[in-house]
Image: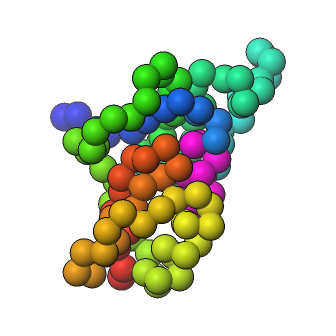
Amino acid sequence: MARLKDVVFDCRHPASLARFWAAALDGYRIAPYDGTEPFDPEDDPTVLVEGGSPRLWFQLVPESKIVKNRVHLDVRCDDLDAESRRLTALGARVVEYVEDWIVMADPEGNEFCLQGP
């Protein structure tokens, strides 16, 4: 039986997008390296964010995002209005208000849905 391990984001700047998602999700953080190689997340073409399941990988790609995501994350929170303000302060933007959730986009334009309790 297969199990979900990672979600991988193609992006223009892995470090900044990894920092956004590490701050956005409760219990997640940028994963430390094992110390065997020099690490500067600003120059790294792949950055891992861990702390829950699934882990989130951010990998450098040369092209920009052009179209709507075919897959998106659903993020649940206790207070929809407060959380949308917090995520907006981190660099997200509101795309659309839909019934009892908000469609948002991360700093590189990847859509996700913010849902209340």
State which quadrant residue 16 falls in. top right
Where is residue 69? Give x, y as percent. Answer: 28, 43
Q: How is the image coloured?
A: rainbow
Does residue 9 lie above or below 52 as drawn? Answer: above
Q: Count of labels shown?
A: 0
Does residue 49 lie above or below 25 as drawn? Answer: above
From the viewer's perspective, tell me whether residue 58 is left or right of residue 37.
left
Q: Is residue 28 visible?
A: no
Q: Is residue 101 visible?
A: yes
State which quadrant residue 7 falls in. top left
The residue nearer to you, when weighing 39 against 102, is: 102
Where is residue 34? Give x, y as percent. Answer: 73, 25
Quadrant assignment for the N terminus: top left
Q: Residue furthest top?
A: 37
Residue at 58% over, 58% down: 91
Does residue 75 lie above or below 72 as drawn? Answer: below
Q: Is residue 20 highlighted in magenta?
A: yes
Residue at 47% over, 21% down: 61
From the viewer's perspective, tell me whether residue 99 is left or right of residue 12.
left
Quadrant assignment for the C terminus: bottom left
Q: Main secondary structure of the magenta part?
A: helix
Where is residue 77? Give x, y as percent. Answer: 44, 75
From the viewer's perspective, tell me whether residue 97 is left or right of residue 75.
left
State which quadrant residue 87 falls in. bottom right
Residue at 60% over, 21% down: 45
Q: Residue furthest left?
A: 1
The residue nearer to you, when weighing 29 against 70, is: 70
Magenta span of residues = 17-28
The residue nearer to you, when weighing 95 against 117, is: 95
